[in-house]
Image (cartoon, grey):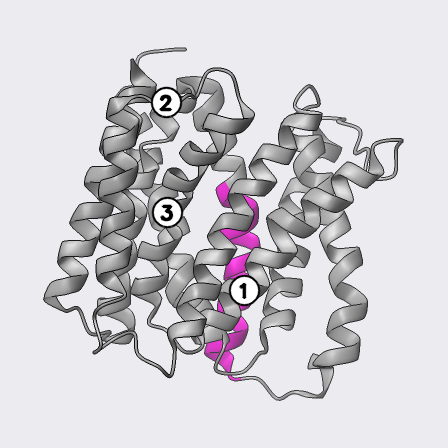
Amino acid sequence: MKKPVLIDYILLTILALIWASAFFNIKIATYSFGPVTIAFLRVFFGAIPVILLCYLKKIKIEAFSKDWHWFAIIGFINLVAPFFLIAYGVKSVQSNLAAILMSTTTLSSTVLGHFYTKNERFNLVRTIGVLIGFSGIVYLFSDNLLINENNFISALLILLGATCYVVGGVLTLKISKKKNENVTGSILIWAIIILLPLVGLTEQPWKLSPRIDSSISVIYLGLISTGVAWLLRFRILINNGLIFQSQVSYLIPIFGTILGYIFLEELVTFKVFISLAAVCIGIYFVRKASFK
C-alpha cells in the first residue's frame, strides 16, 4: 500500500460526502416513494455501474453459481433489509439522526468481530470505544425534541438496518476469496430479484406521479451513493488499504448532520452535538485499537 497523498485524502472526503448525502436524499425520496420502492430503485440503479465494470474488466459474475445461496442471503441481509429499514425509518426521523445512528456499524462490527473473528478480540481500548460510542446513541434517544413516542420505533428500525450491514459483512467472509466486483455484482442482482416481486405486490410504483426532486434522489441513491461510491471505495482499498479507508466512519455522521441542516434545514440540538462527539470518539478508540 502506498503512503496516502493529497489526492487520496480528497477521494476519502468525496466518499464520505457521497455516503453522507444518501441520508437527506432518502428523506427527499420518501416524499413520493415507499420504502420498498426506494430499496428496489437503489439496487437497480446501483447495479448498473458495477455490472458495467465487471463487463469491461471481463470479471465473471457468479450470481447463479453453486454459491448462489450465499449471494442471495447476503443480498437480502446486506442490501434489501437495511435499504428498506432505513427508508422506512427516515420517513419519520430527521436524516441527520439517521446518519448518526448508522455510524454504529463500526461499533457493532467490533462487538460481532470479537465473537466471529480471531484477530478482532476485545481489549481495553476497544471496550472503551464501544462503551463511549453506544453511550452517545443512548443519550441521543433522550432528545425528546427529535425522538419521541411518534418516531421512536422508526429510530430503532434504522439501528436495526445498521446491524444488518454488520451481519451481512460477517457473512461475506464466507465468500471472501472471490473478487469484490463479482461479489458486489452478484448480491446486487439477487437484491433486485428479491425486491422486484415485493415492490410489484406492495407499492406498485408505476401508478405514482412522483415529484421531480424525489425521482432525482432515488436515481442519485442508486447510481452515486450505491454504485459509484462502491467503486470509489474499492479504489481506495486497493491503493491505501482498509485502515485508511475506514477513517470515512468519522466523517459520515459529521457530513450527514451538516448536509441535513443545509438542504433540509433540520434541527440540530445540543444533544445531537454531544451524541455526535461521543460516537466519533468511540469510533476513534475502536480504530486506534485496530491500528495497533
Residue pointed to by mark 3: 104
* CA neighbours of label 1 inside 10 A, class few (<14), some (14 to 19), many (20+): many
Asked if marks 2 and 1 touch (Cβ < 8 Å), the reply is no
* CA neighbours of label 3 inside 10 A, class few (<14), some (14 to 19), many (20+): many
Marks 3 and 2 sit apart, C-alpha to C-alpha, by 17 Å
Residue sitting at x 14%, y 69%: 269
In the rendered image, which quarter contains the C terminus? top left
Residue pointed to by mark 2: 243
Check if residue 20 falls in the magenta segment. Answer: no
Region in magenta: 211-229
Q: Is residue 138 above or below residue 209?
A: above
In the rendered image, which quarter contains the N terminus? top left
Q: Position of residue 196 (x, y in %)?
A: 78, 65
Q: Secondary structure at mark 1?
A: helix
Question: Is residue 71 found left or right of 145 in the rendered image?
Answer: right
Q: Nearer the viewer, mark 3 or mark 2?
A: 3
Q: Earlier in the sequence, mark 2 or mark 1?
A: 1
Q: Which amino acid type is shown beneath numbered disc 1? A: Leu
Residue pointed to by mark 1: 85
**Dominant secondary structure of the magenta stretch?**
helix
Q: Is residue 129 above or below residue 4?
A: below
Q: Which mark is residue 190?
A: none
User: In this view of the protein, which residue sits in the foreground, 5 or 283?
Assistant: 283
Check if residue 218 falls in the magenta segment. Answer: yes
Q: Which amino acid type is shown beneath numbered disc 2? A: Ile
Q: Position of residue 28 (x, y in %)?
A: 43, 75
Total tally of numbered discs in the picture: 3
Residue sitting at x 80%, y 57%: 193
User: In this view of the protein, which residue sits in the foreground, 113 or 73?
Assistant: 113
